[in-house]
Image (cartoon, rainbow, N blue to C red):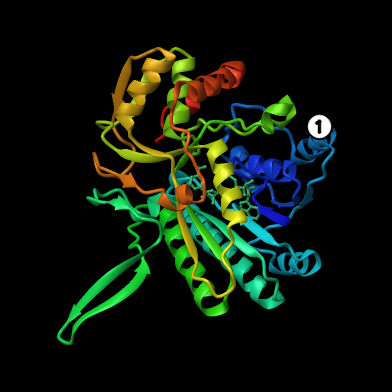
Amino acid sequence: MKIFVLGGDGFCGWPVSLALSAKGHDVWIIDNLCRRRIDRELGSQSLTPIRPLDERLRVWREVSGREIGWVNFDIVRDYTALKRLLQLEKPDAIVHLAEQRSVPYSMTSIEHRRATLDGNVGGTHNILAALVETGVDAHLVHLSSIGVYGYETLGYRVPDGHVKVSIQSSQGAAEREILHPANPVSIYHLSKAMDQLVLEYYSKNEGVRISDLLQGTVWGTQTPETALDERLVNRFDYDAVYGTVLNRFILQATLGQPLTVYGSGGQTRAFIHITDTVRCIELALANAPSRGDKMVILNQVAETQRVMDLALLVGRTLGGTKINFLENPREEPESNELQVSNAGFSALGFRAKTLGEELMCETKDIVARYAFRCDKSHIFAAA
Ligand SMILES: NC(=O)c1ccc[n+]([C@@H]2O[C@H](COP(=O)([O-])OP(=O)(O)OC[C@H]3O[C@@H](n4cnc5c(N)ncnc54)[C@H](O)[C@@H]3O)[C@@H](O)[C@H]2O)c1
């Protein structure tokens, strides 16, 4: 297949691009490198020394003998470039990862709120509008977040996608199938909830073939392809704005520092390892809906864990069990239950890797190798 990977220089996009290329697909990255610019804005950097994208692509050619194309433009601001590229290349599928993905970044200021909401929803809409305008029948795989459903305890296992509801009225009960109710608690999650409505519209009314994947927090760094050469190494964010809780714990354990838990640590979140992200996207691509099918919505989640249990697990596995409790910098429930079904992906053959010792030790090894690059002042506000 010819596959466009929008956001192919990012944390998920880079390993996805390599894995698809390794499987023989004709991969094209579209990325304007804005994530690297955000690193400069924040004065932070990936713990791992990620190489410039043109060098990454050259090394991939050397190592694999395979070519990945790269086109540098902003999918939000340059609709014409997007449309022209679609017209010229007519991809079979598009993996859309080119969104601003940090919750804290989306809440930093009015400018950051506007950039996140306008950019995420605007980019998604541009792709859909360009598919309709050009008549290119590509399968669009969009990455969303399971956090669109919020962090209240729901009392049931969150199903994949659409749900059946019964609406009572004086005329009796009417049955409807609707999107699972969204309950976003950040501008980032609001943008993903709005994305989903836009996607549903284009699926229902314009016949665009769409899969929306609701992902948990991704952890880990390397995949078989990024590990082939040091110059292909994937990004590892640990800073206050883009770093995630598990990366922070693994880094702290590696540095022999106490693990910092916000609030009571009763927050339950969903997780998935980066190799499983790649696997799920491959499965979604291989199981495209047909024209006229309803939008596929799949929970891309391996497991859920309470933050406190995660800290204890990292402590047990990697050593350094001291835990410091800090005031929670985020506005979120002190504790919640979260259960998520991944029946949809399981039916497609997905067998999730959970937070086993082996994977965590592998991540620790890569963290230990580059620990000298860590700026400790960037770790501690990370939520
Ligand atoms: N990383 C996670 O834990 C996680 C969890 C759930 C969902 N997701 C979703 O997966 C997707 C990818 O996340 P990631 O962690 O790889 O993010 P990332 O920030 O590392 O990568 C995004 C890439 O898209 C590019 N990009 C952004 N806006 C662009 C634009 N307007 N035009 C062209 N290129 C643009 C960036 O330069 C970057 O290379 C996002 O939609 C994110 O919301 C990620």
Q: Nearer the viewer, residue 286 or 247?
A: 286
Q: Residues within 10 Å of mark 1 (few under 14, many from 20)?
A: few
What percent of the width, then of the height, locates residue 107? Answer: 42, 49
Q: Position of residue 98 (x, y in %)?
A: 60, 53
Relative to 326, 33 lies left or right: right
Q: Position of residue 199 (x, y in %)?
A: 51, 67
Can you tell me whether the CB of the residue at mark 1 lies under 8 Å from the nearest atom of ligand 1?
Answer: no
Compared to 358, does 203 lie above or below?
below
Mark 1 secondary-structure assignment = helix
Residue 27 visible in image = yes
Residue at (60, 40) in percent of width and height: 11
Mark 1: which amino acid? Val
Q: Which residue is mark 1?
A: 63
- Compared to 129, does 94 lie above or below? above
Q: Is residue 161 above or below residue 383?
A: below
Kindly indicate the quadrant of the structure image that contains residue 142.
bottom right
Where on the picture, by quarter, is residue 221? top right
- Locate the N terminus by quadrant: bottom right
Q: Nearer the viewer, residue 49 or 286?
A: 286
Q: What's the residue at 44%, 32% (across, down)? A: 354
Q: Nearer the viewer, residue 120 or 86?
A: 86
Left or right, residue 168 beside residue 184: left
Give percent across and percent down for residue 123: 59, 62
In the image, taking residue 298 as reference, residue 43 lies left or right, namely right
User: Which residue is painted at 14% across and 85% down in the image?
Assistant: 170
Quadrant location of the C terminus? top left
Q: Quadrant of residue 95?
A: bottom right
Instruction: Tell me how many marks there are.
Output: 1
Q: Is residue 375 visible?
A: no
From the viewer's side, name the closer residue of 160 and 363. Answer: 160
Q: Residue at x 55, y 75 (%)?
A: 292
